[in-house]
Image (tube, grey):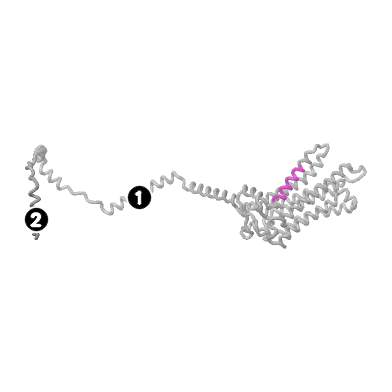
């Protein structure tokens, strides 16, 4: 049977200490103490000075009030430095430049991505014909964007191109006619036809410009609207000049009177056209009435000619047939424009093509070409017939 031997921890610790070899005796080195004593003996400090040094007060920590003052002074210095920097840098100009850059960026993006809108989404100054529902141009506050829009399809596309092509056509005809040598066409004849060409080109050109930039802004739209109506007055005046000149070729007094009345009526029409409210949708019938009345004033000299010369001579020499056809075309176009036909009967169906304003433009161009044909026949008759008879008491201008 095995026996159990109990060993206490103290006994194990004593045995371990006995096993550790004893270390050699360590001799204390007192050399450092000797050095200190020699230094103290070399530098002797008087007892009074030592006591004075020991009595020096220890530095006290700063008080809270002093900390607040120090922070305030540093804050003032920082603010002063910031104001100095602000004086050197114009932040207002930087902000203005940043706003302009942002506006230019968004304008360029909008110009390239704009879409046609519904009539109800237009601002009040662009709402003209409520029977045209869709495909309206939004405001485009850039002339480049307005002129680029002539290649897009919208409610003004037909209005723009009809009078743009008509203007170019009359510019070409005028250039050809006025460039003829004086042997073929005398200077006096050129001046008479130049009045008609100028009226047609101004009218069609101003109409093209108005329908192109009408969506730019309210100010630009109103300005070019006035120019558009003035152009119509110039066309009517220019159309009267050749017919009165050749119709009363040998009658000086009636010719002068009728030309003077035409000038006065044209001036009145232009004056009314410059009225701000004249171009608003409310006065659409008034606009049509003013220009129809101005055009129908030509009935008076036409009746005078018929009474004095008779219908046969009027038809053969004065191109009365062309004159009547021209009047019918002008009046028909004005009535369609005033009554807004056919879109009145088909709302939303004539938004892009064949609405009243486009038909009005087409009839105006047709009437202008009919009139050009008529006055050309009158001029050819006068050139082939020659001057007035010697025994004719009437005087030619």
Q: Which residue is located at x 25 percent, y 51 percent?
A: 62
- Disc 2 crowd, CA 10 A, few/some/many (<14, 14-19, 20+): few
205 horizontally vs 193: left or right: left
Q: Give the range drawn in magenta.
A: 160-174
Of labels 2 and 1, earlier in sequence is 2
- Disc 1 crowd, CA 10 A, few/some/many (<14, 14-19, 20+): few
Q: Which label is found at residue 135?
A: none
140 horizontally vs 249: left or right: left
77 horizontally vs 175: left or right: left
Q: Which label is found at residue 10?
A: 2
Asked whether residue 252 is in view, the answer is no
Quadrant the N terminus occupies? bottom left
Label 1 SS: helix
Q: Position of residue 336 (x, y in %)?
A: 75, 58
Give the prevailing secondary structure in the magenta stretch. Answer: helix
When the figure is inspected, residue 24 is found, relative to residue 106, above or below; the finding is above
Q: Rounded to the nearest whole Å, what is the CA distance between mark 2 and mark 1?
A: 71 Å
Q: Which residue is located at x 9 percent, y 54 percent?
A: 12
Asked whether residue 162 is in view, the answer is yes
Q: Mark 1 highlights which residue?
A: 75
Q: Position of residue 227 (x, y in %)?
A: 69, 50
């Amino acid at each position: 049977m095995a026996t159990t031997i109990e060993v206490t921890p103290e006994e194990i610790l004593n045995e371990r200490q006995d096993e550790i070899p004893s270390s050699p005796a360590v001799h204390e080195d007192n050399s450092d103490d000797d050095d200190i004593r020699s230094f103290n003996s070399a530098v002797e400090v008087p007892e009074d000075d030592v006591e004075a040094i020991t009595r020096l007060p220890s530095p006290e920590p700063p008080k809270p009030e002093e900390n607040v003052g120090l922070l305030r002074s540093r804050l003032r210095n920082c603010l002063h430095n910031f104001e100095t920097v602000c004086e050197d840098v114009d932040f207002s100009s930087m902000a203005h430049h940043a706003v302009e850059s942002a506006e230019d960026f968004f304008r360029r993006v909008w110009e390239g991505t704009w879409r046609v809108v519904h009539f109800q989404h237009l601002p009040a100054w662009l709402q003209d014909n409520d029977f045209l529902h869709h495909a309206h141009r939004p405001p485009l506050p850039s002339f480049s964007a307005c002129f680029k829009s002539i290649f897009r399809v919208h409610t003004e596309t037909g209005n723009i191109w009809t009078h743009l092509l008509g203007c170019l056509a009359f510019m070409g005809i005028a250039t050809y006619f006025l460039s003829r040598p004086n042997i073929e066409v005398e200077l006096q004849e050129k001046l008479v036809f130049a009045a008609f060409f100028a009226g047609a080109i101004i009218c069609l050109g101003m109409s093209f410009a108005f329908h192109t930039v009408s969506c730019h802004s309210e100010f630009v739209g109103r300005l070019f609207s006035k120019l558009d109506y003035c152009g119509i007055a110039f066309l009517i005046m220019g159309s009267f000049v050749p017919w009165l000149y050749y119709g009363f070729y040998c009658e000086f007094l009636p010719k002068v009177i009728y030309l003077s009345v035409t000038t006065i009526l044209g001036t009145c029409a232009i004056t009314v056209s410059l009225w701000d409210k004249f171009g608003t949708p409310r006065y659409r019938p008034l606009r049509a009435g003013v220009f129809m009345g101005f055009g129908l004033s030509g009935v008076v000299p036409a009746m005078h000619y018929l009474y004095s010369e008779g219908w046969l001579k009027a038809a053969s020499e004065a191109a009365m047939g062309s004159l009547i056809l021209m009047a019918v075309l002008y009046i028909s176009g004005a009535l369609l424009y005033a009554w807004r036909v056919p879109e009145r009967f088909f709302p939303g169906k004539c938004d892009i093509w064949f609405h009243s304003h486009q038909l009005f433009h087409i009839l105006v161009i047709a009437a202008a070409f009919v009139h050009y044909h008529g006055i050309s026949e009158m001029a050819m008759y006068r050139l082939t017939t020659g001057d007035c008879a010697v025994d004719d008491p009437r005087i030619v201008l």
